[in-house]
Image (cartoon, rainbow, N blue to C red):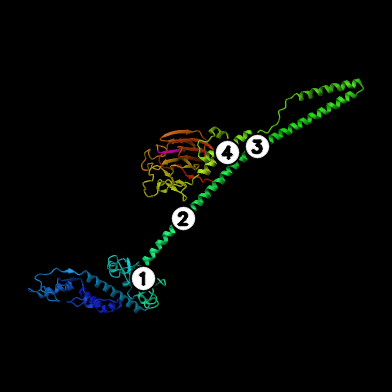
Amino acid sequence: MNATSISISLRKLFSKVFYEMAESCHARICHDDLKCGVCLDLFMEPVTLVCGHSFCLDCVEHYWVNRGGATRYTCPTCRQVFSRMPQLSPNVVLSRMVAQMKLQVMKMEKRKSKAKTGDGVPADKEEEMPGKCEVCKEESVKFCVPCEIQCCITHVKPHQKRGHKLVEPDTDVEALRCTQHGQLIQLYCKDDGTLMCPQCMPGSHQHHEVLSVEAAHIELKKQLTEKMESIQESRQNVAAQLQQLRLEQSHEQKRNELHEIVDEVVDIMKARVKAKENAALASLRERKHYMEREMQAILEAQALMQQEMNESNSLGALQLHSDIQHRLAALEKVANTPRTPVRLDVSEEVEQLDAYLQLNKDVISGAWPPHVTREELEREPEMALMLLKNLRCLYGNFLTLDSTSAHPELVLSRDLRTVTRSGSLHQYPDFPQRFDHYAQVVGVESFSLERLFWEVDVSRAEDCSVGVAYASLSRKGDGSECKLGANSMSWCIRKCDDVFTALHDGQETLLDVPGIHQLSFYLNCDAGELMVYMGISLVHTFKATFNQPLLPALQLCRGQSLSFCPLN
């Protein structure tokens, strides 16, 4: 069988089942309107003449070839004669209608095939091809619910233009049909809140307010939009109240911490006063024992003197007199010894307590530098410790690192608070803010007007730099404008084999400090100061006019990792 015979057979098959399709689809188009007047079958590539009649392209061309003569170019239907071969314009509308009808025919044949197998499985498995277009076998992109056919990106266009309901290829179509009548669900009853097909209307929904599914969806979205606006407003109000509660809770927590710090200072002073009190009592006890011994000596001398006075024997009296003279000389020496009174002097402790409390007030109020001097802090480690506790309590911040800025050799922890150098390059996206030469990373949070305190653990780094940098610090290239501490846009402390230096704009200042494991930073943007503590000692102060937002910055050259410390 040649291609022409197959084409004719298909056309006759389409023509045969057309009436069945028209009835099942409630078609309003006459069968003859889709038939060629020459071959009397469904159109194949329909074209329309200037007289308005349409034919298959091959049919009308063969008709003219077979006629010949001067009147060969005649309309096969109305017999209008054309002086020359008329322009054959494709009839797009008829092409689409015929194509749609063919799709319906194929779908019906498939149903019949499924019905013959008895188990819902087509006899010819190649014809089903799940996920494939049922016209051209290309990849299916949509399923047309009314036509019950899978369509590729090309054959779905006619269904889109007709406004057919299209769903994803793997959609459960049966869920879109009325369970009672088997038709496509197209309506929504507002009174009952139920979905239904057109055949459900004459029943209990006859006098109800019924909308199309699309209109009901639009109305529902409008209602949801209004509710969303109300919910969003409520959410904002609740979020504001929650933020206020968190702020009050934070303030209350800080007040409690400050009270604990003051209580701790008072306890220190109490301990010092108690130590002085114990020392004074010990001195008093020793003085008491000494005076008791003196009293005993006086009583013994008094007894001897009474005995001498009562002695009748001259020789015995003289012998007692010599002993009495020695005792009296010793008592006179004791009596002439100056005695300083034992007093409990706590004035120094009171002054220190006043200094502690004043320092606490200075830190809380933001007055800097505090009234105490650096020398006083060095002499009073408790005061220095209290200062750091106050700074940590009032200005401690939970800092995190910006993963989009990390050099490809750096790996950040899940909580974004620890950076590790892996030694190998990772395939990170090349963001503009990422360092591409120096193994550096900056923080997420920027600050420009705040006072801020944070701490960094440097114990697992052999060669590193820790500090701050302007957010506008260059990130690309190996120039000094990108390196932490080597330009005017960054300030840092560098650790290299337990040797610490302060770096800014390429200038180094050697710090005479012992090897430590933790750096504490206090940034006061208003005062233009970045103070660096090691332990409880203030080791360096950077002074600058910070006129741009600042970011915490870390550089890890050698070693395992650097971490922001928890501010407990």
- Magenta stretch bounds: 489-493
The three-letter amino acid code for the residue at tag 4 is Leu
Please identify the residue farthest to the left as the structure is shown.
70
Percent of width and height locating residue 276: 67, 35
Q: Is residue 539 magenta?
A: no
Look at mark 4 in the image and give the residue it sits on: 357
The three-letter amino acid code for the residue at tag 2 is Asn
The three-letter amino acid code for the residue at tag 3 is Val
Look at mark 1 in the image and give the residue it sits on: 211
Percent of width and height locating residue 204: 40, 77
Earlier in the chain: of badge 1 and badge 3, it is: 1
Earlier in the chain: of badge 2 and badge 4, it is: 2
In this view of the protein, which residue sits in the foreground, 365 or 138?
Answer: 365
If the image is split into quadrants, where does the N terminus sit? bottom left
C-alpha distance separating marks 2 and 3: 53 Å
Look at mark 2 in the image and give the residue it sits on: 237
